[in-house]
Image (cartoon, rainbow, N blue to C red):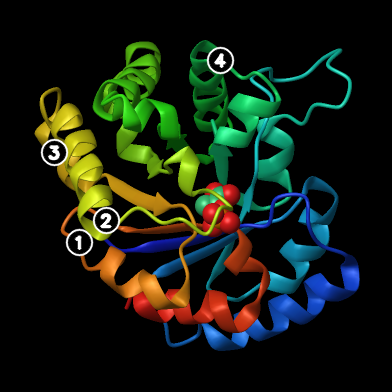
Amino acid sequence: MRKKLVAGNWKMNGARESNAALLAALVGGVADCACDVAVCPPFPYLGQVADLLAGSKVALGAQTLSEHAAGAFTGEVAGAMLAEFGCRYVLVGHSERRTLFAECDGQVAAKFAAAQSAGLIPILCVGETLAQRESGETSSVVAAQMAAVIDVVGVKALASAVVAYEPVWAIGTGLTATPAQAQAVHAAIRAQVAALDADVAAGLRILYGGSVKAQNAADLFGQADIDGGLIGGAALVAEDFLAICRAAN
Ligand code: PEP
């Protein structure tokens, strides 16, 4: 039985005052949730959020990391730094990083490895664009994104990782994959991993992300291979995020 995980990706949103209000509501509200819960704030707020989450069941995550351990990489943040601030998770290969910051598959694989070297749990994001879906390439695109990481780190590395299937056309658009569309891709990801290692595949948490809301979360999370969600916009509103967490119960 895989324990569900609901992770909030705050993207480049937040301020000290609103963070404190949001987290106060979350920490109290998730106390009775059976699923794992995490929030991924922007880098400058990691210290503040770590303090506010201390002793709670909400884990801390970051939104990206450098593939390098240290050195002359102005503006970058190393995995060890995230670990020092109490991060448990880090997003790797989010589509906004792949598209807006030109992160290629090789860099995503290197970031995945760097996260694990620092003791962090990477949440590896994969997903197709609308054009790729419409031309029937969804399975091949997602399989290639998975393979690009597995080929570098090995399938066993997925035993200490999470995957998030996020169709690019559903992120921040209000469009959501239907539960059946999402389940089909999740099942394909699990089958791809199972072909290499059945035990790793059986334990692998595969989250769905892309305009998850309180209204659609239960149907998505009810699918056999959907093990929780990666939540963007709705993670910024305490009531919405809490309702999604409850849907994972
Ligand atoms: C995301 O940023 O990972 C995401 C899924 O965003 P949204 O929920 O806003 O579509």
Amino acid of disc 3: Asp
Secondary element type, mark 2: loop
Mark in front: 2 vs 3: 2
* 217 lies above or below 198: below
- To which residue does mark 2 refer? 226
Crowding near the residue tagged with mark 4, few <14, some 14–19, many ≥20 C-alpha atoms within 10 Å: some
Task: Tell me, yes or no, whether the two marked residues, 1 and 2, touch with CB atoms within 8 Å.
Answer: yes
Amino acid of disc 1: Gln
Judge whether residue 123 can be spotted in this image.
Answer: no
* 230 lies above or below 57: above
The circle on residue 223 is 1
Amino acid of disc 4: Cys
- To which residue does mark 3 refer? 199
Q: Measure the C-alpha gap from mark 1 to mark 3.
A: 20 Å
Relative to residue 58, is residue 160 drawn left or right?
left
| Position of the C terminus by quadrant | bottom left
Relative to residue 191, is residue 19 drawn left or right?
right
Q: Measure the C-alpha gap from mark 2 to mark 3.
A: 17 Å
Task: Tell me, yes or no, whether the two marked residues, 2 and 3, touch with CB atoms within 8 Å.
Answer: no
